[in-house]
Image (cartoon, rainbow, N blue to C red):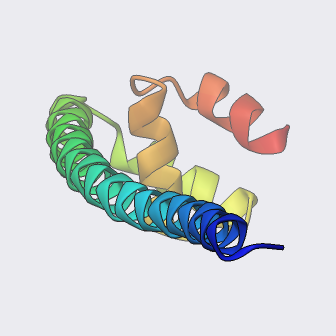
């Protein structure tokens, strides 16, 4: 090879090496941008979860208020708790969920 050809080959090798380095740098910066986008997505998802959790909490509180308003017979609570060997709180809750209907509550508990 003559001197001019050797310089051209070196330039070609340098050009390919520069292209490879450029591609590697692009991949690196793309990855950083993806991480930033993922961070934003995570923050949005966490905000959605927080609002969903708050909505669930409010719904649960409303349900508890509705159940507390149901009139039940304390004798029914005692009978259900004693006969089915349950805690009185469980018997009372089940009775409230069935709007004070002892038969429906017992059927539900015996399933």
For image coordinates 65% across by 25% down, the residue present is 103
Residue 11 placement: quadrant: bottom right
Is residue 99 shown left or right of residue 48?
right
Above-or-below relation of 97 to 94: above
Given residues 109 and 44, the one toward you in this image is: 44
Residue 17 spot, x, y in % from top left: 60, 70
Q: Is residue 91 left or right of residue 59?
A: right
Q: In this orientation, which residue lies closer to the viewer: 67 or 95? A: 67
Q: Position of residue 105 (x, y in %)?
A: 61, 33
Furthest residue toward front: 2
Residue 10 drawn at (x, y percent): 63, 74
Q: Position of residue 81 (x, y in %)?
A: 59, 61
Q: Looking at the image, which residue is at 73% across and 58% down?
A: 83
Quadrant location of the C terminus in the rendered image: top right
Q: How many marks?
A: 0
Tell me where residue 13 sits by quadrant.
bottom right
- The residue lying at 35 percent from left, 49 percent from top is 74
Q: Residue 30: which quarter of the image?
A: bottom left
Position of the N terminus, as image quadrant, is bottom right
Task: Name the residue at 16% across, 43% down.
Answer: 51
């Amino acid at each position: 090879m003559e001197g001019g050809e050797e310089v051209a080959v070196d330039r070609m090798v340098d050009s390919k090496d520069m292209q490879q380095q450029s591609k590697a740098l692009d991949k690196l910066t793309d990855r950083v941008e993806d991480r930033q986008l993922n961070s934003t997505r995570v923050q949005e998802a966490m905000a959605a979860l927080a609002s969903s959790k708050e909505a669930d909490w409010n719904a649960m509180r409303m349900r508890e208020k509705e159940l507390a308003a149901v009139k039940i017979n304390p004798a029914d609570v005692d009978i259900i708790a004693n006969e089915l060997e349950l805690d009185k709180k469980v018997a009372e809750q089940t009775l409230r969920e069935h709007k004070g209907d002892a038969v429906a509550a017992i059927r539900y508990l015996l399933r």
